[in-house]
Image (cartoon, grey):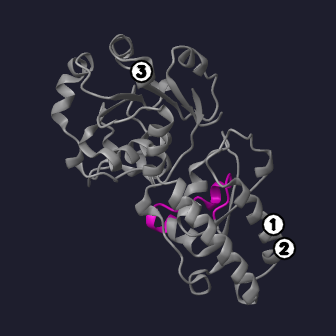
Amino acid sequence: MIHPISFSVPEEKIFEILDVRSMKKRILSNLVPGDMTTYVYTTEKDYNHQYRESYFAYTKKKGGWDCMRHYEIMANGCIPLFQSIEDCPVNTMALCPKHLFVEANRLYSARFVGKEVDSLREEDIREYTILLKKITKYTQNYLTTAKMAKYVINKSGLENVSKILYLSGCVGPDYLRCLTLHGLKKLFGRCCHDYPKIEHIYKSKNIKYHELYGKGMTYTNLIEPTLRNDELDKSIQEDILEKRYDMIIYGSYHRGIPFYETVCKTYEPNRIIMMCGEDLHNCDYNNYVEKNHSVFVREL
């Protein structure tokens, strides 16, 4: 009943590099994890563009192994250089192409260290392009928000799911909760209802990006407001009691589980999904497993 899960990236954010030689301007991205002097990008466009112009970009474990930066690098046609990836626990980042990260580190060491862009040979570009295509294809096939949402549905073992209630205890930024919700919205549209409303994932001209974690890059301003029926907010408890939804998902059980007692009295345990997207935590997932809920843990 315990399943690994990871962050994901909206499909529309994936940029495929068609001509490496003409696109790339530098061997390494200017952005270095942990070096705050390199955190100079204030817009998502500029942030993404610097990855697209770079052959490689450093990334590493921060609070947890899984980090949104990994996905942003891959989505922008850049190859991650992942420090100490061999030490990552087998069930953490289990859905990521860790074998390709190992290959990337080897390729960089063998062909790119100490070189300038103008000094790269055709065989260097060829080997790089082959690996980049593998990483981009993997991202498209397994790491989009919609693919991650399908993974959650499939692992739950439930069939004929058509209506989902996605519950949150708070509405602040949370990568796993926000991006998985985006994937469910892509699959189910208005038939996946988030409560309370996660305002910043809906398209709007009023989002205060400077107040959001990571300036809101990658996980905000994604969904058309028409894909949410605000009227359903008025009858949440009644709809739970009447089993309007086929599945209840708690986007982060660490950050609140509203209506949990009512949900448990109404729904079969296997129709209640619990998610943990925290970096560091004293995780009580065994309590939920004992209740026969499916539990998805990011840093397992």
Q: Mark 3: which amino acid?
A: Ile
Q: Which mark is residue 257?
A: 3
* Rendering quarter of residue 128: bottom right
* Image position, residue 57 (x, y; %): 66, 65
Q: Secondary structure at mark 1?
A: helix
The residue pinned by badge 1 equals 106
From mark 2 to mark 1, how far is it between C-alphas?
Answer: 6 Å
Residue depicted at x 28% and y 53%: 203
Q: Nearer the viewer, residue 289 or 298?
A: 289
Q: Residues within 10 Å of mark 1 (few under 14, many from 20)?
A: few
Based on the picture, tell me whether residue 32 belongs to the magenta stretch.
Answer: yes
Q: Nearer the viewer, residue 216 or 186?
A: 186
Mark 3 or mark 2: name the one nearer the start of the chain: 2
The residue pinned by badge 2 equals 110
Q: Residues within 10 Å of mark 3 (few under 14, many from 20)?
A: some
From mark 3 to mark 2, how far is it between C-alphas?
Answer: 50 Å
Residue depicted at x 56% and y 19%: 289
**Label pair 2/1, CB-CB below 8 angstroms:** yes
**Label pair 3/1, CB-CB below 8 angstroms:** no
* Image position, residue 109 (x, y; %): 83, 70
- Classify the position of the N terminus by image quarter: top right
Q: Secondary structure at mark 3?
A: loop
* Image position, residue 287 (x, y; %): 57, 15
Q: Mark 2: which amino acid?
A: Ala
Q: Secondary structure at mark 2?
A: helix
**Label pair 3/2, CB-CB below 8 angstroms:** no
* Rendering quarter of residue 298: top right
Q: Is residue 168 visible?
A: yes
For the magenta stretch, what is the residue range?
Answer: 31-47
